Image: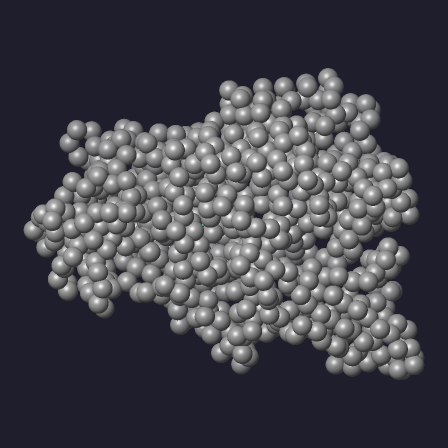
């Protein structure tokens, strides 16, 4: 068995590359099992050091310097590196290698998906294509020539703009592509095959014409329309919001079914997981449309934050990812509803990043060391990275932030930069010293902020004592205080704010930058005690602890003027109630609380997307973070009891809302999506009622649903209700969609997400289960292990075993996928003793069985 123990790469070991490679020509002769890659690079020494190139799994046919072939004794190939001892200061290196794309199941480098060639080079895939200094700070101008069989691969794409093209003998043809912008190798891309294309164009704010194309499977072009609309919206938004225009005459997107992540921002040729490109009203949910819009935006925004300004080394990954997630969140907020977007982003952060930050895989947003770079594409780097940018905007204000961004674009365009470079721009723009803020990047763990209030009636003075503490994380026992910008307001309880000295319209930003800080708030004489609203809009990624009981939280929820905090008050109330129900299994849910929750939904019905979010109770994964040892099954059943009572309180509303017709004709607009979100929430609550009538209502709604959002919501609600209605729905849905893999992924996921370990195993043995397709593997394994915690962490250990078996099989084909699935074990130390013991046994078994470097990196850290 392969067992590679990861060797750690350290930030402090960074040294610049000794050579510059101004330009490179790549010549691809495409064959499924033996593609020839001829590379010609102009190399120039800029500092002392060895000439070393990376290369993995390459068969070297020829190598020459300035036209003279090298002898075997002139170079050394070892540990995936090619070293040439004596090189001139300026020279041309030519290499000729053969690779086997068809055998590439890791989906990194050049591979084959559905008979077409496709590449993925971030982070270290380029070295699986040719010998090259595969590091982001080596930037070069790429010229690419591709030749291939014309009938099988009529379309040949790469980065930049197209050059010469033509026919060749033997039924082959060729195409050339030129990218004038120097780029690191991780942004290289190549796609070849037969596609249908949805075309459009865009004129930039500078008047430049850009040809746009979305390349998809044959017969699917009209399913690319939404992706195209999203692309044009992104191009416009980046011009208006950040003054950034597109910089080439062509922008293409290619959809592939086999892809390890969501999408990839290769220069001028974004490659997407087809799940984030293809959408039609009948087969895609509103969540799909929303995800496409946001991911198309994300990849497009990388053109400036990632491509024009790239990262010096992979430790700076958050420089492009945190910033680009922040940008895509802002884009979605501007296109849709800001408060709703904020709530969704925080839900995701709490579910994924807070969990990561509280377990053995916790790491700083910019780590000091890593074992495997593929495992650094984490919620912490992406989501917490984005939160830090948002917190920065609160700390220095929007004007200084915008000014700092322009300084960044002006000063660092064309460079490979660091977090220090980035922050220097905001120091310039704001005149503030941001060195303490940068601690956020170096310390793992979620800070806990405690707020204590004291009211002095006689003085009309509110004293706030704020303190912060960040729990220990692996290899970081002690933490220093970080600056935490907390948006605050004083509420009058009648929907307004109370003025205080130094506050504006009753609002301010309190920066908690010490372990403890006291803030005196002076109100005008005779004022009544105001209610404190804090961390409004979730201005800092922290956990806030307040001394508020149920009555206090309900009062605060009624007085709140910040929609995020209204939602959050109900989250806190629901969480406390679920814990109480877990501790008091005989006691019924609190009627008063349930009716307050139901009232809040009714009160906000005019903003249906927001009202829908008010029906979502914290999920087991989140509850679990506050309960150690955690009993996921117990939490799940306590949660279900509260949800049932909630559904009963809303029974009349459920019927009323679902009796109204679904909006027609279908549009993926935010407005219609909001209406469907509330309808979907009502469908979900119908399922929570759990009665036979509910099942038959769901079945008839399922039968008549005119869109995927509602159809899938019905199926999801029916799954936990055994009987004929459920079985028929499962069958009908499969029969209707069996030829649409993206919909069948959903069919697998709704079942795995709510079934038992036996169900997950049965699904993994279904004829449509495909171990070589990451979307399909995730639709069973990730849906089960990441969203169905009660079954995954069942004390009998069966859930752990089924996932471990899938991971072991997946790892042989695709280590990056296996490593990602392994992160579902990250909370194992928090589990109740039986599940904890089972998780440990399974992790140890995996460790002993021998795994890839990526998978071993996760197992070792998880067990540590
Ligand atoms: N940069 C991409 C994410 C990505 C990372 C690695 C990949 O393969 C190993 C693929 C995509 C993004 O942020 O969208
Ligand atoms: Zn990204």
Coordinates of residue 548 in the picture (x, y in percent):
83, 60
The residue sitting at 71% across, 22% down in the picture is 726
Which quadrant holds residue 396? Answer: bottom right
Residue 280 left/right relative to 707: left
Number of marks present in the image shown: 0
510 left or right, relative to 57? right
Residue 785 seen in this snapshot = no
Q: Say which residue appears at 43% left-offset and 51% top-offset.
A: 371
Q: Quadrant of residue 522?
A: bottom right
Q: Quadrant of residue 648?
A: top right
For the rendered model, the colour scheme is one colour
Q: Position of residue 62 (x, y in %)?
A: 14, 43
User: Up-down: is 565 above or below 111?
Assistant: below
Residue 8 appearing in the image = yes
Question: Depth check: 95 or 801 in front?
Answer: 801
Task: State left or right for residue 717 relative to residue 445.
Answer: right
Residue at the image point whose x is 87% and y is 64% from the top: 494
Q: Which one is nearer the viewer's eye here, 184 or 370?
A: 370
Relative height, residue 795 to residue 568 (above, below): above
Name the residue: 55% across, 56% down.
Answer: 474
Rendering coords of residue 135 (x, y %) = 33, 56
User: In what quadrant of the picture does the N terminus appear?
Assistant: top left
Query: Percent from the top left, x then y, of residue 680?
Result: 71, 37
């Amino acid at each position: 068995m392969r067992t590679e123990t990861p060797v750690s790469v350290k930030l402090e070991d960074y040294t610049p590359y000794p050579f510059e490679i101004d330009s490179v020509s790549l010549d691809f002769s495409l064959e499924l099992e033996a593609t020839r890659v001829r590379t010609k690079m102009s190399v120039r020494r800029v500092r002392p050091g060895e000439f070393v190139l990376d290369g993995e799994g390459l068969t070297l046919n020829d190598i020459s310097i300035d036209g003279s072939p090298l002898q075997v004794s002139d170079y050394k190939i070892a540990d995936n590196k090619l070293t040439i001892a004596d090189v001139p200061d300026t020279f041309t290196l030519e290499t000729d290698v053969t690779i086997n794309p068809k055998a590439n199941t890791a989906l990194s480098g050049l591979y084959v998906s559905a008979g077409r060639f496709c590449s993925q080079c971030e982070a270290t895939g380029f070295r699986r294509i040719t010998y090259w200094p595969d590091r982001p700070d080596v930037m070069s101008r790429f010229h690419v020539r591709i030749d291939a069989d014309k009938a099988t691969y009529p379309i040949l794409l790469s980065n930049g703009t197209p050059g010469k093209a033509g026919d060749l003998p033997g039924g082959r043809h060729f195409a050339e592509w030129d990218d004038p912008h120097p780029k690191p190798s991780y942004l290289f891309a190549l796609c070849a095959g037969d596609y249908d294309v949805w075309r459009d164009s865009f004129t930039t704010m500078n008047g430049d014409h850009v040809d746009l194309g979305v390349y998809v499977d044959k017969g699917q072009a009209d399913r690319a329309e939404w992706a195209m609309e999203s692309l044009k919206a992104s191009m416009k938004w980046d011009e208006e919001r950040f003054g950034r225009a597109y910089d080439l005459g062509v922008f293409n997107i290619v959809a592939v079914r086999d892809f390890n992540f969501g999408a990839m921002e290769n220069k001028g040729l974004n490659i997407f997981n087809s799940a984030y490109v293809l959408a039609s009203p009948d087969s895609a949910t509103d969540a799909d449309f929303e995800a496409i819009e946001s991911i198309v935006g994300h990849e497009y925004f990388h053109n400036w934050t990632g491509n024009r300004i790239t990262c010096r080394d992979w430790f700076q990954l958050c420089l492009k990812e945190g910033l680009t997630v922040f940008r895509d969140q802002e884009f979605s907020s501007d296109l849709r509803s800001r408060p709703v977007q904020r709530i969704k982003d925080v839900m995701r952060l709490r579910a994924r990043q807070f969990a990561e930050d509280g377990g053995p895989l916790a790491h700083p947003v910019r780590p000091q060391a890593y074992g495997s770079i593929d495992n650094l594409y984490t919620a912490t780097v992406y989501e917490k990275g984005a939160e830090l940018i948002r917190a920065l905007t609160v700390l220095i204000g929007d004007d200084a932030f915008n000014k700092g961004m322009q300084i960044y674009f002006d000063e660092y365009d064309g460079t490979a930069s660091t977090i220090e470079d980035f922050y220097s721009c905001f120091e310039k723009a704001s005149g503030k010293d941001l060195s303490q803020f940068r601690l956020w990047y170096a310390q793992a763990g979620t800070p806990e902020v405690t707020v204590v209030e004291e009211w002095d009636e006689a003085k009309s003075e509110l004293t706030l004592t704020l303190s912060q503490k960040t729990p220990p994380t692996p290899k970081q026992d002690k933490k220093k205080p970080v600056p935490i910008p907390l948006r605050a307001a004083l509420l009058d309880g009648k929907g307004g704010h109370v003025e205080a000295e130094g506050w504006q319209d009753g609002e301010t930003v309190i920066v908690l930058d010490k372990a403890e800080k006291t803030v005196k708030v002076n109100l005008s004489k005779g004022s009544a005690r105001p209610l404190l609203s804090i961390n409004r809009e979730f201005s800092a990624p922290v956990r806030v602890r307040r001394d508020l009981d149920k009555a206090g939280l309900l009062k605060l929820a009624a007085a709140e003027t910040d929609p995020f905090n209204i939602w959050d008050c109900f989250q806190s109330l629901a969480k406390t109630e679920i814990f109480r129900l877990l501790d008091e299994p005989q006691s019924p849910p609190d009627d008063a609380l349930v009716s307050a929750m139901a009232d809040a939904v009714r009160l906000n019905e005019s903003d249906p997307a927001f009202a829908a979010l008010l029906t979502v109770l914290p999920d087991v994964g989140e509850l679990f973070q506050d309960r150690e040892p955690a009993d996921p099954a117990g939490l799940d059943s306590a949660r279900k009891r509260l949800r049932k009572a909630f559904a009963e309180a809303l029974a009349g509303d459920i019927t009323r809302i679902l009796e109204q017709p679904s909006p027609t004709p279908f549009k993926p607009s935010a407005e219609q999506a909001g209406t469907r979100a509330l309808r979907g929430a009502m469908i979900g609550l119908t399922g929570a009622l759990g009665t036979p009538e509910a099942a038959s209502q769901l079945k008839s709604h399922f039968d008549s649903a005119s869109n995927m959002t509602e159809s899938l919501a019905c199926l999801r609600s029916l799954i936990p209700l055994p009987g004929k209605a459920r079985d028929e729905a499962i069958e009908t849905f499969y029969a209707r969609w069996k030829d649409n893999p993206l919909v069948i992924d959903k069919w697998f996921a709704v079942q795995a997400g709510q079934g038992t370990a036996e169900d997950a195993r049965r699904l993994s043995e279904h004829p449509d289960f495909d171990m070589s397709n990451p979307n399909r593997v995730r639709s069973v394994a990730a849906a089960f292990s990441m969203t169905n915690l009660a079954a995954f962490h069942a004390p009998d250990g069966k859930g752990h075993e089924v996932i471990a078996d899938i991971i072991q099989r997946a790892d042989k084909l695709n280590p990056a996928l296996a490593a990602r699935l392994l992160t579902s074990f990250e909370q194992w130390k928090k589990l109740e003793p039986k599940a904890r013991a089972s998780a440990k046994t399974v992790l140890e078994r995996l460790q002993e069985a021998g795994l890839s470097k990526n998978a071993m990196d996760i197992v070792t850290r998880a067990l540590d």
